Every structure is written in structure tokens, then in C-alpha cells.
Amino acid sequence: MSEHDIADCPKCEKRDFVLKEDGVWICLKCGYTQKMPKSKYDPAPEPSILSILFAAFLIGLFMMAALGL
């Protein structure tokens, strides 16, 4: 397989639209660029430590309320 995928440019309609490694399509003829849409198969971003701590805090509050403390 080649290093780049090639397609027709939606702006100038020439077959110079290439996909770079960073997920951006670029036309070598007119310079038009387009970012690839996210796929449902792309890995999900990892949650931040702040969101994990907030979730733990909420779980603790619900547990305290359930126990009647």
C-alpha cells in the first residue's frame, strides 16, 4: 500500500487530494485542507484525574446519603 491515500479534491476536482499521517486531507493542486471526521472505532480519550476525583466524590456522597449519615 502507498504511503498516502489519494482522492478527488472536493474544491478543484483534481485527483491530488492526499491523506497525511495526522488525519488531514490536503490538495496538492489548490491547497484545500479538510480534517478527517472522528470514527466510532477511534479510541476514546482517557478520563482526566479531575473527573475521576469528582466521580469518586459523588459516589461517596450517595453512599453517605444511603447509609443515613
Image (cartoon, rainbow, N blue to C red):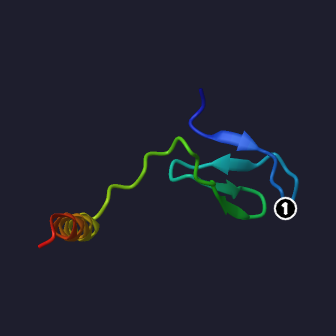
Count residues near mark 1 (Cα–Cα under 10 Å), then give few for <14, some for 14-19, many for 20+.
few
Q: Quadrant of the N terminus?
A: top right
Identify the residue shown where x is 87% and y is 59%: 12
Is 4 left or right of 7, judged from the image as shown? left
Residue 21: x and y, percent?
Answer: 51, 48
Identify the residue shown where x is 43% and y is 46%: 43
Farthest residue, direction right: 13
Is 8 left or right of 69, judged from the image as shown? right
Residue 25: x and y, percent?
Answer: 66, 54
Residue 32: x and y, percent?
Answer: 73, 64
Query: Residue 58 sits in which quadrant?
Result: bottom left
The count of marks equals: 1
Farthest residue, direction top: 1
Q: Quadrant of the C terminus?
A: bottom left
Identify the residue shown where x is 15% and y is 70%: 68
Farthest residue, direction left: 69
Q: What amino acid does circle 1 point to?
A: Lys
Is 62 left or right of 45, judged from the image as shown? left
Identify the residue shown where x is 58% and y is 53%: 38
Q: Tell me the element at label 1.
A: loop
Is 45 left or right of 22, judged from the image as shown? left
Between residues 37 and 66, which one lies in front from this camera angle?
66
Between residues 57 and 41, which one lies in front from this camera angle?
57
Name the residue carrying label 1: 11
Q: Is residue 16 above or below residue 12?
A: above
Between residues 30 and 46, which one lies in front from this camera angle?
46
